[in-house]
Amino acid sequence: MTRTATAILVFAGFIAAPPARGDDVADRMYRLVPPLTNLASTVEGAVRYKNLAPEVDGAELLEIATRHDRRLLAPFAGYVVRVQRQGQHAVVLVCSPRQHVALFEDSGCTAKPDRHHWRSEVVRPCAFTLDAAATCSERAAAP
């Protein structure tokens, strides 16, 4: 076999090989990004424009915000989705179902997820860490 043929076979083996576990996890996480930003902006919109009572938060807020389109939650089947109201802003937290590990955290005022906890070297518990007021004011101040 020539060197060129060997190189082609080796390269073809890399292409045909199944992705490594880390690549599979990354792929699954990156597929959640667009639905997460849609969900976060929907919840943010509910907080800002639906004239909800101040005590509406958590699961109740998530239910009200997605009532018009339950498909917003479909990509997160099997995950834990939490919502926290922070003044006139909202934060969505997505966690693993069994280990209760934070995966993403996003305020609805930004165009992309604010925190990719799943990429952190430190395992983060399924708890809110984002300050939406600070995040949203930073976003407003950006050029």
Image (cartoon, rainbow, N blue to C red):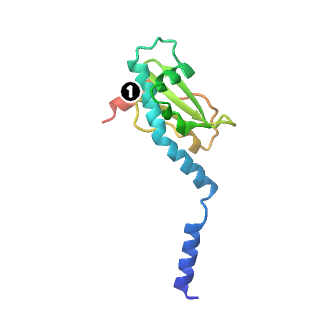
Classify residue 108 as left or right of residue 95: left
Residue at image location 42% in from the left, 30% down from the top:
41
Task: Pick out the residue farthest to the bottom.
Answer: 1
Vertical arrangement, residue 80 with respect to residue 30, above or below = above
Q: How many marks?
A: 1
Q: Amino acid at mark 1?
A: Ser
Q: Residue at x 49, y 34 (%)?
A: 71
Placement of the C terminus among the 4 image quadrants: top left
Q: Position of residue 135 (x, y in %)?
A: 43, 29
Q: What residue did someone put label 1 on?
A: 137
Relative vertical location of residue 27 with respect to residue 60 in this rendering, above or below: below
Q: Position of residue 142 (x, y in %)?
A: 33, 34
In terms of depth relative to the viewer, which is nearer, 68 or 56?
A: 68
Sort mark 1 into few (<14), some (14-19) or many (20+) by Cα contacts within 10 Å.
few
Q: Position of residue 5 (x, y in %)?
A: 54, 83
| Quadrant housing the N terminus | bottom right
Q: Secondary structure at mark 1?
A: helix
* 38 horizontally vs 125: left or right: left
Q: In this rendered view, identify the residue nearer to me: 95 or 143.
A: 95
Locate residue 138: give its quadrant.
top left
Q: Residue at x 53, y 25 (%)?
A: 83
Location of residue 49 with respect to 98 vertically, above or below: above
Task: Provide residue 3's location: percent of width, then percent of height.
Answer: 55, 85
Q: In which image quadrant can residue 51 be found?
A: top left
Residue located farthest toward the right when viewing the structure as drawn: 98
| Residue 131 in view of the camera | no
Q: Is residue 36 visible?
A: yes
Residue drawn at (43%, 20%), measured in percent from left and top? Answer: 47
